[in-house]
Image (cartoon, rainbow, N blue to C red):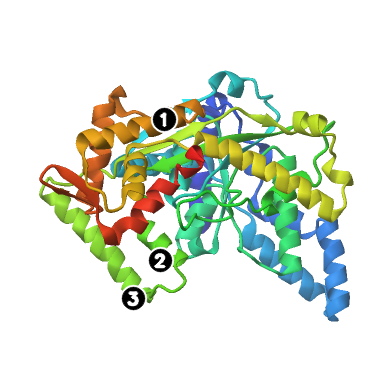
Amino acid sequence: MLPGVRWWFASRASRVLDDVGAKLNIEVRPFQQTRRQALIDLVTYDAKVQETAAAFARDNQLPRDLVTARIRSYASEIVPAFNAYLYFRLGYFIRRRIAQSLYRVRLGYTDAAALSQIPKNSTVVFVMNHRSNMDYILAAYLAADQAALSYAVGEWARIWPLQQVIRSMGAYFVRRDSRDDLYRRVLERYIAMATANGVTQAVYPEGGLTRDGLLREPRIGVLDYMLRGFDPAGERDIVFIPLGINYDRVLEDRTLMLAHDRQAHRPGIARAAWNTLAFVARQVRLMARSRWNRFGYACVNFGAPISMRDYVARNGVDFRNLERDERFARVTALGRELMRQVGNLVPVLPVPLVATVFASAQDESLSELELKARIEKLIEIATARGARIYVPRRDWDYAIGAGLEMLTLRHLVMEEDGLYRAVDSELPLLRYYANSIAHLFK
């Protein structure tokens, strides 16, 4: 039955490409439509991969066929199987329903004029901060009219049938912190090929989820793979688009904080699964009683594009001609500049703003009037520094009330006789949300 199933999806994918392709600002590239097996062969027998394979076989005294088979297994693990029907029809429907069911989703700011000036044949790379696994869903949902995004996904998603679905959405799998030189060469060449062929990608320079809410130092692996062969005079420019994401509530906040605390007791797999089921059951009970509310606001800001042709001309650098250490230093400098741009775009939302006040107040009890006065000072600082502040309904009283209500409903803040103060045991979680915008006040 499998050939029939493949034919059914392939025929609908072709129709979707005809229907959607003309409406996208960044078209789906032929490289994404190439059969997966052909891409696997292309990566496996790439000249640079085979050069590394020969050295590996010689150094480890292994048969060349065995090394090639190992390379093919790596390529099969990495290479996606993009399907336009699943991405633009089924995938879009699922992303929209999940995002809108859990959050009040908002597109805060976008530099539409600058985005419209990007040359059509450029390789566009969205660069964003990484706060939650919802980032994949939210960014792809809000960018659906721009392009089909290709993500790097960690090993957590390599379970059946999730990996098949994710792969069909154009995502490729990455082993975090792998020290296998052969694997890293295969990954490098796939990313280089996708970049050279104009595939629109989305990357997290931080390398993983933030554990304490703060922006992390960039890890340059993927950026380096994209840039080490970049030809400023070539057919395609590489254009980075900074993107800032923030949430009033991160679904996995306590789990992330637990991972950050090395001395904290960590539950086993069974306990973690039980906690997840208990959380879902609690939300279902609230829905049944008509007492369930969405988890506040989720907002995305798109910044001005950064052309690599302009960047290398301005800085007098050609990544192709640099020695390894100097190239790493240059790419690190670029990564920090991109993360600075992303940090400036992180939306200031009600909960992080209110949490900032209580995280600094600690034992103080504040009236609603005192709370608003302190928030007003924070807003003045953030506005002066060009921060992107999202004000629900353009009403500050409503925004502050919404943030305060969420924190009290979660028992992070308690109210007594009209005065509010942070719950001592929940101060780390308040700091976690405050940290999402802390860089805007430094």
**1 or 3: tag closer to the N-terminus:** 3
How many C-alpha atoms fall within 10 Å of the one at disc 2: few (<14), some, or many (≥20)? some
What is the secondary structure assignment of the residue under circle 3? helix
Q: Residues within 10 Å of mark 3 (few under 14, many from 20)?
A: few
Counting residues from the start of the chain, the first of labels 1 and 2 encountered is 2
Q: Mark 1 touching mark 3, by CB under 8 A?
A: no
Callout 1 amino acid: Ile
The residue mark sitting in front, 1 or 3, is: 1
Looking at the rendering, which quadrant does residue 40 occupy? bottom right
**Residue displayed at 84% across by 55% down:** 324
Q: CA distance from mark 1 to mark 2?
A: 29 Å
From what the image shows, is residue 437 above or below residue 268? Answer: above
Tell me residue 38's x, y (percent): 70, 52
The residue that mark 2 highlights is: 258
Across and down, in percent, residue 175 comes to 61, 64
Q: Where is mark 1, residue-wise?
A: 389
Residue at position x 83%, y 43% from top? 319
Q: Is residue 212 above or below residue 439?
A: below
Label annotation for residue 270: 3
Image position of 33 with respect to 378: above or below: below
Q: Distance of mark 3 from mark 2, alpha carbons?
A: 16 Å
Q: Position of residue 371 (x, y in %)?
A: 26, 37
Tag 1 secondary structure: loop
* 204 or 137: nearer the viewer: 204
Point 38% across, 75% down: residue: 265
Residue 441 on image: x %, y % = 48, 38
**Type of amino acid at the residue the image marks with label 3:** Ala
Frontmost of labels 3 and 2 is 2
Discs 1, 2 touching: Cβ within 8 Å: no
What residue occupies the far top of the structure in this picture?
113
What numbered label is drawn on residue 36?
A: none
